[in-house]
Amino acid sequence: MVIRDPVADPRGGALTRGRVPADPFRKTGWQVRKSVADAVRNAVANGAADSQNAFVERALIRELRELRRQRLYDAYAEAAADPAFLAGMGAVSAAFDTAAGDGLEPGEA
């Protein structure tokens, strides 16, 4: 059985009731402030989502994607500050520079 990551796979949220999904629903015990719950209820009443559950799940997935994106950017920044990584990338780039003109006549590049 393959369980999709709803953050990596946008189809992860496309589950319908009555179908046994690979990633089943789970009741949680999280609490939010009354004002937030009221705002969600009002947003759903105004058509923002099919249900409060769908609205909250969509918001959580959006936040999880942002966290994943930020971790990736942090890793890029760390690599950009690593002299050994930069030297390795320079070597790879130099190796590809010699292949970039393969098959071309001088001045065609």
Image (cartoon, rainbow, N blue to C red):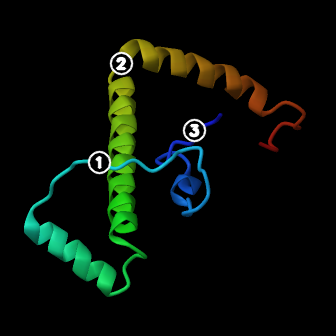
Residue assigned mark 2: 82
Distance between mark 1 and mark 3 Cα atoms: 19 Å
Q: Which mark is residue 28?
A: 1
- Nearest to viewer (mark 1 / mark 3): 1
Q: Is residue 109 left or right of residue 32?
A: right
Return the x and y of residue 49 as percentages of the image width and height: 40, 76
Q: Residue, x 47% and y 15% (percent of image)?
A: 87
Q: Nearer the viewer, residue 4 or 64?
A: 4
Determine which quarter of the picture holds residue 62: bottom left
- Nearest to viewer (mark 2 / mark 3): 3
Q: Which mark is residue 3?
A: 3
Q: Residue, x 54% and y 52% (percent of image)?
A: 12
Marks 2 and 3 close (CB-CB < 8 Å): no
Q: Residues within 10 Å of mark 1 (few under 14, many from 20)?
A: few
- For the residue marked with disc 3, what is the amino acid? Ile
SS at circle 3: loop
- For the residue marked with disc 1, what is the amino acid? Thr
